[in-house]
């Protein structure tokens, strides 16, 4: 069974750094794109970034380029999303999702449970 | 950058009715690269349709997708109360590689 399990909720102050995680199981982690999707309170889905663990290839949405960093550790089947300096506007639910394989980004058939990030002074 | 515009933004219908949701792209999208998702409050999105018209595993045949080029639709026949949700379209073939529409909120009254 394919599963994506995300790290727990975080409460941070503006200016702090943060790294959240998404651990995949039940499939070949290296061979599928994993992406992060933001959902601000009461708003829609926004794609942020995607990584192909097999070759560490990454793609970023223009809206999030330079604001976050996506990475993966194949040895523990885990993808990460990190911020170096959080802002209050980063308060949101963040979902990881498994997309397609190879040159096919694909649709996301599997999603994590979400990680709620709250940034407040 | 491809922009997906969904319509209507919200709608309210009764059980048993049929509904068609629209997703219009700012430039042509290969039908191979268009998906639809359902999201209920407090839940992660669920994939309904991929490649414009193929139902994902476990999705009832009340849900169907169609379209090509810049115009795509999701049709739900015989609405049920549990279909109340926000529906999103997504393209996954162009630069940027992934884009979501802004969503359509469907209420079953």
Image (tube, rainbow, N blue to C red):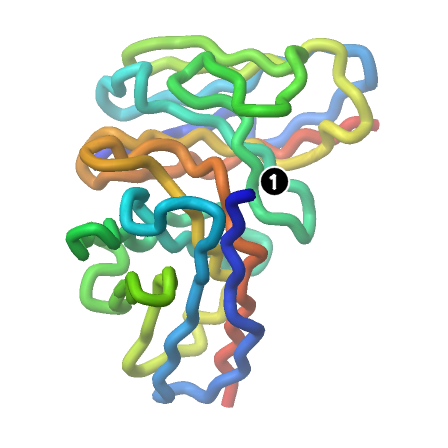
Q: Quadrant of residue A114?
A: bottom right
In the displayed structure image, the side of residue B51 where residue B62 appears, left or right: right
**Which corner quadrant holds the N terminus of chain B?**
top left
In the displayed structure image, the side of residue A97 where residue B96 appears, left or right: left
**Which corner quadrant holds the C terminus of chain B?**
top right
Residue B9 is situated, as x and y percent measured from the top left of the image, at 56, 31
Residue B30 is situated, as x and y percent measured from the top left of the image, at 26, 17
Residue B23 is situated, as x and y percent measured from the top left of the image, at 43, 22
Please report the residue visible at 50 percent of the width from the left and 33 percent of the height from the top: B88
The total number of labels drawn is 1
- Rendered view: B60 above or below A118: above
In the displayed structure image, the side of residue A83 where residue B56 appears, left or right: right
Please report the residue visible at 24 percent of the width from the left and 39 percent of the height from the top: B97
Residue B25 is situated, as x and y percent measured from the top left of the image, at 32, 23
Give the residue pinned by disc 1.
Answer: B39
Please report the residue visible at 21 percent of the width from the left and 36 percent of the height from the top: A102
Please report the residue visible at 48 percent of the width from the left and 85 percent of the height from the top: A12
Subunit under mark 1: B
Q: Quadrant of residue A8?
A: bottom right
In the displayed structure image, the side of residue A58 where residue B109 appears, left or right: right
What crowding class fits label 1: few (fewer than 14 Cα within 10 Å), some (14-19), or many (20 or more)? Answer: many
- Rendered view: A5 above or below A17: above
Q: Nearer the viewer, residue B57 or A49?
A: B57
- Rendered view: A41 above or below B47: below
- Rendered view: B50 above or below A74: above
Q: Secondary structure at mark 1?
A: strand
């Amino acid at each position: 069974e394919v599963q994506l399990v995300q790290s727990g909720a975080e409460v941070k102050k503006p200016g702090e750094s943060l790294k959240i995680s998404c651990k995949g199981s039940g499939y070949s982690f290296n061979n599928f794109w994993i992406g992060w999707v933001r959902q601000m309170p009461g708003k829609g889905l926004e794609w942020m970034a995607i990584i192909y663990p097999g070759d560490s290839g990454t793609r970023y949405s223009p809206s999030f380029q330079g604001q976050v960093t996506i990475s993966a550790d194949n040895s523990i089947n885990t993808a990460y999303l990190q911020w170096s300096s959080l802002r209050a506007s980063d308060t949101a639910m963040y979902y990881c999702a498994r997309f397609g394989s190879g040159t096919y980004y694909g649709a996301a058939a599997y999603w994590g449970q979400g990680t709620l990030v709250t940034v407040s002074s | 950058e491809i922009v997906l515009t969904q319509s209507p933004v919200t709608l309210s219908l009764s059980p048993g009715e049929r509904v068609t949701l629209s997703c219009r792209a700012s430039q042509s999208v290969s039908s191979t690269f268009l998906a639809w998702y359902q999201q209920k409050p407090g839940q992660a999105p669920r994939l309904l349709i991929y490649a414009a018209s193929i139902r994902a595993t476990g999705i009832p045949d009340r849900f169907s997708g169609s379209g090509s080029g810049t115009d795509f639709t999701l049709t739900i026949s015989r609405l049920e109360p549990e279909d109340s949700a926000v529906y999103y379209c997504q393209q996954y073939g162009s630069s940027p590689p992934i884009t979501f529409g802004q969503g359509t909120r469907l209420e079953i009254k």
